[in-house]
Image (tube, coloured by chain):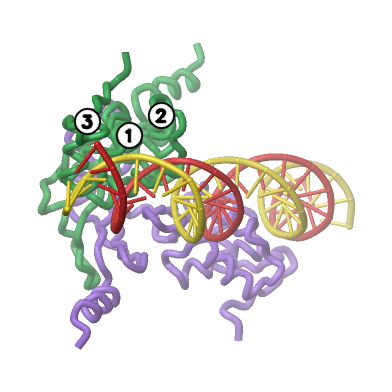
Chain colours: A purple, B green, C yellow, D red
DNA sequence: CGGTTGTTTTGAATCAGTCAAAACACCTGT
DNA sequence: ACAGGTGTTTTGACTGATTCAAAACAACCG
């Protein structure tokens, strides 16, 4: 069985499920590639364009990579997904949005985990000096080593 | 007059000034492109590789872009400069290093300003949940609009 | 069910950065 | 002072991620 059965009705080519409503609610047309991309993002909470592409392609083999870029761009513009770009990685997309959470990134393998805001929204949004900037958002990235990479590094250092 | 007179002595082809010592102190050979790059970074506190390249080229026309990438990479490895990669910009290099400061980035024009750490080093380094990661560093980026872009945006919205 | 508008396909191009080998030059030791 | 070894720079090609543009297509409104 596939991950989602797209039931066609008389008026809605791609069904009327939760995902379809999610799209319509932000004024986007409901298409198969978009539904598949939403599903892919649900399964891969921090996916790059290529990961989404491959997941979408598994269900819809004719989908092009450019379509995925278009879909992800539309999602980001609509506020449906957040786009993050950790140094050294391609852009990642996540559905968890609007809650001011931050990220933990492994320097070795690039793995990303979510972290709730440390010091509360207001402190996060208040730099000591703004240089006259209108500050809209504070983005926090914690860099470190994930458990797997820490274990691998320890094994190399102490090969017994 | 040029920005720096490189005085050749019997033993040191590229002088023995402060910048040369900076390089020797971290075990790097002193070369003209490296001195020029250090100067360029002093004049442009958040410069991308191309900006450094053009500044170096002004003094040393034969310098290649790849040399600049090499120089900046060597500086970063030696801890002489910090490399930041704000989303949507190419990598930027800055000489201010080791003081855990953060950045204010203009969403419109990409301008970058330094900001001292908001809540103190320890709080910055302590996420609420680490998912088992060994956290080494917290990077904070404040996104907003610089004064110039805010004024430009206001002028468009209110064209009178 | 037809038309409009927005989406996807197709194909090409750009930008930032990396890789590799050969020419070169800094620095050490004599 | 000078020659050698090692690290740097040049030269040239190449990759990965993303964007641009035009034509074919499909969702949605009436």
User: Chain letter of disc 2?
Assistant: B
The residue located at (41%, 53%) in the rendering is A85
Label 3 vs 2, first from the N-terminus: 3
Q: Position of residue B65 (x, y in %)?
A: 46, 40
Label 1 vs 3, first from the N-terminus: 3
The residue located at (28%, 29%) in the rendering is B39
* Local secondary structure at mark 3: loop
The residue located at (10%, 53%) in the rendering is B122
Direction from residue A29 to residue A47 in the image, left or right: left
The answer to whether residue B42 is visible is yes
Residue identified by numbered label 3: B15
Q: Position of residue B153 (x, y in %)?
A: 45, 24
Label 2 vs 1, first from the N-terminus: 1
Disc 2, disc 1: CB below 8 Å? yes
User: Quadrant location of the N terminus of chain B?
Assistant: top left
Vertical comparison of A55 with A27: above or below: below
Disc 3, disc 2: CB below 8 Å? no
């Amino acid at each position: 069985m596939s991950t989602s059965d797209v039931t066609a009705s008389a008026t809605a080519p791609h069904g009327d499920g939760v995902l379809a409503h999610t799209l319509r609610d932000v004024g986007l047309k409901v298409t198969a590639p978009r539904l598949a991309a939403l599903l892919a993002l649900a399964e891969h909470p921090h996916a790059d364009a290529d990961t989404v592409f491959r997941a979408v392609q598994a269900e819809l083999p004719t989908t092009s990579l450019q379509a995925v870029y278009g879909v992800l761009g539309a999602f980001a513009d609509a506020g449906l997904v957040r786009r993050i770009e950790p140094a050294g990685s391609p852009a990642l997309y996540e559905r968890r949005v609007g809650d001011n959470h931050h990220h933990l990134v492994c320097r070795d393998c690039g793995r990303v985990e979510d972290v709730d805001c440390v010091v509360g929204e207001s402190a996060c949004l208040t730099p000591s000096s703004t240089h006259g900037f209108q500050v809209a958002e504070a983005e926090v990235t914690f860099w470190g080593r994930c458990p797997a990479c820490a274990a691998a590094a320890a094994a190399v250092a102490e090969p017994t």
